[in-house]
Every structure is written in structure tokens, then in C-alpha cells.
Amino acid sequence: MTDTVPAQYTGPRRILSGIQASGALHLGNYLGALKRFTQLQDTGAPCFLFVADLHAITVWQDPALLTAQTREIAAAYLASGLDPAKSVIFPQSAVRAHTELAWMFNCVARLGWLDRMTQFKEKTGKHKERASVGLYTYPVLQAADILLYKATEVPTGEDQKQHLELTRDIAAKFNNDFNVPGFFPLPEPLTQGPAPRVMSLRDGAAKMSKSDPSDASRINLIDDADTIVAKIRKAKTDPEALPETVEGLDGRAEAKNLVTIYAALADETKEQVLAEWGGKGFGAFKPALAELAVASMAPVTAEMRRLMADTAEIDRVLKDGAERAAEIADPVVDEVKKIIGFWRG
Ligand code: TYM
């Protein structure tokens, strides 16, 4: 990838992230993304949080469900504590500039850069010729999402790291090719949260994911208390007691995952969790973790259900968010078109 050194970006701080509108949200999304967004909301920079519905259709989405899934993600943003007065919450497809800038970035990004994207390889396996072209250029659209708002910080789970590196490469190449140093910022990836990679409850080597066929592998945001308790009780562990130190978790992927989840839910460090639980077995730890998970998730789930029961509030937030987002995005895409040299009349 390019190693151009760009001039400094001098614009304001802006935080941006998105969640795909494709299926149920889980604890990984909550701890890796949603909970962090609410913490960042009061750090003095405006937050732009969108429902990535354009990204969702890179794989087949039932049109009858896509709208509901979009509202569900919006409900999750609100239920997690995001305040629509402070944060701009919107559906990606409602701001036309996303697709417009994505096309221009398709002409900046190099084929070799996309060929290195591991998520595409993981998602398509041996059948890449059957994948949509959109799935391949997915990270270019993601770069457009981010740079359209000249976002300076992008909080996500660890799985988005490579996409964020590509975004920086596209920004640097655009600034360099068109000789507009510092036009786009090189956004800072904030992938180092307390739980940047929550693992499956059934396999400590696999990421907790909505595409895992086993529902027991994840805690869904809409699971009720009994389901959460049952899934944690059945979570895979080893026969040893919990270690006294964080180093003691090395080589014990499942134990490490449960301790990480506990720490992130309780807003404690792993050291603090192990100071309390080191030497004790999973027979004692799992019920405590289940209780903590239920207590943390229940208010979010209840609020999501309330919002989904009458979608007028969600729709108001999304409409207002789309208008506020376009106010920032439209002038940026206009500037880009001018820089590229498109006819403007
Ligand atoms: P998506 O919808 O797959 O996931 C949404 C957010 O949840 C995080 N996440 C996890 N964090 C910790 N542990 C896990 N097991 C886990 N699984 C998911 C993801 O890292 C993400 O932060 N490409 C993005 C959506 C997107 C986007 C963007 C993000 C589109 N444009 C621009 C940031 C900026 C995605 O598919 O996320």
C-alpha cells in the first residue's frame, strides 16, 4: 500500500462508526461498538453513527426485512444510551453522497489493496466467483462513509482494523494524487476497547458473529434473561480454576473470553476481575457472569423492544439524522468533484 506522508489535517475532531443492517445484534457488537460509542459521545466531538444498509445488501437481504433491520439497529443505538440531540443517527442509504464518493474512491483504491482484504476471503471461501461485486468493493464504500464526514476517530471492534487501514491509504492517495495535502484526515482507528474481539461461547478461537449457525455461540441483544443464563451456563470452558493473573489466561481462550466479557460489562480491568475470582472455578464464576450480563443487557433489551413496538420515534430520529448528516456530507462530496475536475456548470 502507499506510504505517502500527507500534510497535517487541521479540521475539527469527528467520531464516526456504523453497524450493518443484517440480522440480530450480539454481545460482541454491544461491547466492541455500541457501549464504546456511548462513552465517546461526551468527549467533545460530534458522533456520526449510521445503519450500514448499503453494506448489508452486499449479501442477499429480504426487502421485507431490511427496513425492520434498519430500525432495529437504530433502536439499539438509542437503547444503548446514544442521545440523538448529541449524536447524528441515520441510515447510510438516505445520504446519497455515500455512494457517490464510493464510486470516486473505487477509482483511487488499487485492486491489489482489495485483494489483500481478509474479510472478503473469509466470507467467500472457495466460492469467490459467486460473490457480489459489492462484497469485493465493500471496504471502499466504508472508506467513503468515513471520509465523507472527514472523521478523525473511528471506534470499532478489532475485525474492522484492516478496513480502517485501507481508509487511511485511500485518504493519503487522494490527497497526494490531486495535490490537496491535508484535504482528508487520516482517521485514527479506535480498535483498542475493553473487548475489541468477543469470541464465540462455543469456540474460543472463533469470533462471536451473527453468521455463526449456532445460536448458542452468541448472546443476542434481544435474548431474554433465561436464554442468557442458559447460554453462559453451557459456554465452553476448561476444567481449571481461574488464574490469579492475566498472563495465566494465555492458552486458555475460553476462560480469557469470559473474563474479558465480565471485565467489559463491569467496567473493570481483567486484573480486577482476577483479583476477585482467581482460584475460583467456573461453577461459581458463570452464575456471577450471567447475573452481570442480564443486569447490563436487560435495560437495553427492554428499551429496544419499546422503541420497536412503535417505530414513529425511530423514524423521526433517522429522518432528522439523515438531514443533519447530508449537511456535512454534501459539501464534502461537492468539493471532491471540484478537485477531480468534474464539470460544474
Ligand atoms: P458489523 O455490523 O459487522 O459490526 C458492528 C460493530 O461491531 C463490532 N463487532 C465486534 N466487536 C467485538 N467482538 C466481536 N465479536 C464483534 N463483532 C462485531 C465491529 O467491529 C463493528 O464495530 N463494516 C462494518 C460496518 C461499517 C463501518 C463503516 C464501521 C460500514 N461502514 C464505517 C465503521 C466505519 C461492519 O460490518 O460492522
Image: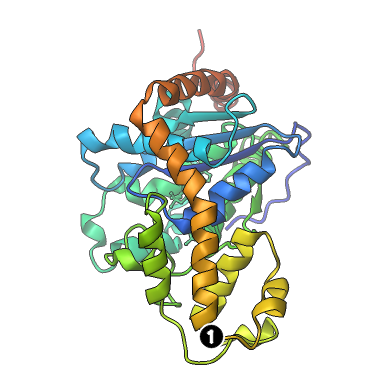
Q: Check mark 1 vs ligand 1: CB closer than 8 Å? yes or no.
A: no
Report x, y in % for residue 269.
Answer: 70, 68
- List the residue tagged with mark 1: 252
Relative to 297, residue 202 above or below: below
Furthest-top residue in view? 345
Residue visible at 43% across and 53% down in the picture: 111
Which quadrant of the rendered structure holds the N terminus? bottom right
Report x, y in % for residue 143.
Answer: 52, 43
Q: Quadrant of residue 102?
A: top left
Furthest-bottom residue in view? 240
Q: Is residue 330 visible?
A: yes
Q: Nearer the viewer, residue 123 or 196?
A: 196
Q: Nearer the viewer, residue 315 or 296?
A: 296
Q: Is residue 166 visible?
A: no
Residue visible at 65% across and 28% down in the picture: 86
Determine crowd level at label 1: few under 14, some 14-19, many 20+ residues with C-alpha closer than 10 A.
some
Q: Nearer the viewer, residue 73 or 48?
A: 73
> Could you tell whether 222 is left or right of 283 in the image?
left
**Secondary structure of residue under mark 1:** loop
Report x, y in % for residue 192.
Answer: 65, 60
Q: Nearer the viewer, residue 175 or 56?
A: 56
Residue visible at 37% across and 60% down in the picture: 226
Residue visible at 49% across and 79% down in the picture: 254
> Could you tell whether 243 is left or right of 240 in the image?
right
Q: How is the image coloured?
A: rainbow
Relative to 296, residue 324 above or below: above
Q: Amino acid at mark 1?
A: Arg
Report x, y in % for residue 124.
Answer: 29, 62
> Could you tell whether 328 is left or right of 115 in the image?
right
Q: Quadrant of residue 230?
A: bottom left
